Every structure is written in structure tokens, then in C-alpha cells.
Image: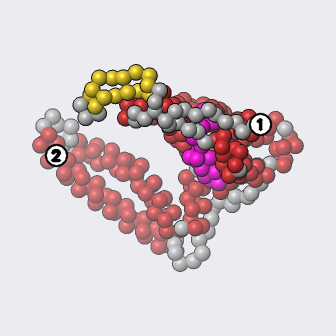
Amino acid sequence: MKGFLESFNTLALIIYLICMLIFISVTNNPVVQAVFFVSICLLIMLADKKAFKNALILAVFIGIPIILINPIVNSRGITVLFRMSEIPVLGDIKITLEALVFALMLMFKLINTVFLFVFFNLCVEPDRFFNLMAVVAPRSAMTATLTAKMVPSMIESTKRIAEVQMTRGVQLDSKSLLKRISNGWPFIKILLFSSLEGSLQTAEALESKGYGYRKRSSYYKEGFKLKDLLIVISGAVAILLIILKSPRNFLDFKFFPRIGVVSNEGICGYIVILILPILVVLPAMLGWRFNKCRFIRRKI
């Protein structure tokens, strides 16, 4: 499944991501946010189960502070669940049902945003993204590429320099803070000189290849297939839901001063709840049908 998701056009995935980000940013209905959360979890799980487990751990660390802190800081709402005695700086604390539901919605909105980027990271390799970025801003893409390369390169240089210094008897892990600082200063200078030397070598390599003197070449030739068109359409439908009046009324929600009644605008609310999981999980659905159906495999 992950291999199929990586075969999507990078531009189509970016459009899909932007549309879904706009959708969850505008939507305040906690029911819709919860449905989106379940859908994006299913999408990531089908793509990579290990990444899904790591994403869930990240969601716990993101969600728990929001649920605990927001109802304490936000005292709006008239449905008081319980009160707390006066706390220094914060004063009297009252936990309201409205603030709790609002915190739940914020939690889902933030987690959904993070999970969308997790899915995007699973589908798009950095080289493909920088290659697309270079079409619009070649110098910015080059800067981003070199920055991404610099971090692992500096980690490797740090390990190598530390091993050399330790063989010379330098105690980088001394218990004395002053001794660690005095021993670490030459280490930092060596790392700085090594980084400058690496930057000069990179500049010479770019100049020898004629970077900037002629039209840039590309190692990636991405086509735009039917599957790419389908996920772009799914993102466009999500944007359409927040533009049309009836779905927009369902996607909005009133929290304060009292929790409003979810208005489904007739049958429109049920349509949104039914169609949203299909829009979110569509890339995985295409991958499943791709593996099952030869006809679809030839078409997409």
C-alpha cells in the first residue's frame, strides 16, 4: 500500500493536503472533527502500521495537555460542571461543559493537522518535494536541500570528532562543568572548521556542474494520471462543502455561552458525515482496488 501511495503525483498530493487542511481549519463541529480523525487514522494505518503507532503516541502527548489546560484557562460557558478553590495567579477556577467540548474540538483539529502531515510524509519523498519546489523557487529549494543535508552530516562529523578527541585523552564527559566547557571549546572550533570546509566543497561541486549557468535538469518526470485527478477532486469536494451554505451551517458549531444544537440542515448533515470518510480515505481505497482489480490497475 505504501508503494502505491508513493506513486501519486507530488503536486496532486500537495493540493489534497492543502484542501484537507483548509477543511479542518474552517470546521468547528466536533462530530465532523471526530469523523475526520477516525478517517485519517484509518488512512495512516493502511499506509504504514508502524507510523500509525508512532502517530498515536504523538496524539496522546498533543491531546492530553489541551484537554487538561484549556478548560482551566477558559472559564466561559454557563453549564458549570464543578468549581475549584482559588489558585494563585489563576484565581477561582470553574470547569464548564462548553469549555470542555471546545477543548475537545481543538484537540481533534490539532491532531488531524499533524496526522495529515504524517500521511504526507509517508507518501512524498523529500527529493520529489524539493524537485517540485525548485520549479517555482530554485534557490529556496537548493537552500532547503542543503539544510536538510546539513543535519545528518553534522551529526556524523560530531561523532567522528568526539572519537578522535577521546583517543587523545580529552574528557568530554567530565563531571566538572568548567572542565567540560574548556574541553568542549576546541571541539566546537573543529566542528566549525569542518562545516566551513564542507560548504566550500559543496560550492565547488555546484560550480563544477554548472549550477545556475543553464536551465536546470530534473531526475523526476512525474505524470498526472487518473488516480491523481481523483484525489484532487476529493480535495475540491471538501472545499465545496465549506463553500455551500447548507453544509457550512452544519460544519459550524456554537460553543458559548451555551452549547448549540447541531443543525443537520435536513439531509445535508448526514451527507457530510457519510461522504467525509470517503474523501479522506480515497487514496487508500484506490490502492486497495489497484491491488485487486486488473482493469483499474491499467487505468490508474
On the image, the x and y values in percent for residue 28 come to 57, 40
- Magenta span includes 26: yes
Q: Nearer the viewer, residue 47 or 206?
A: 47
Disc 1 residue type?
Ile
Q: Which residue is mark 2?
A: 181
Residue at 67 percent of width and 36 percent of height: 263
User: In whole angstroms, how far apart are the C-alphas of marks 1 and 2?
Assistant: 68 Å
Is residue 82 placed above or below 63 in the rendered structure?
Answer: above
The total of numbered circles placed on residues is 2
Q: Which residue is mark 1?
A: 267
Residue at 44 percent of width and 22 percent of height: 81
Query: If you read the primary sequence from the N terminus, does the residue marked by circle 1 or circle 2 appear first?
Result: 2
On the image, the x and y values in percent for residue 135 come to 60, 67
Is residue 42 left or right of 157 when viewed as pictured?
A: right
Is residue 82 left or right of 11 when viewed as pictured?
A: left
Disc 2 residue type?
Ile
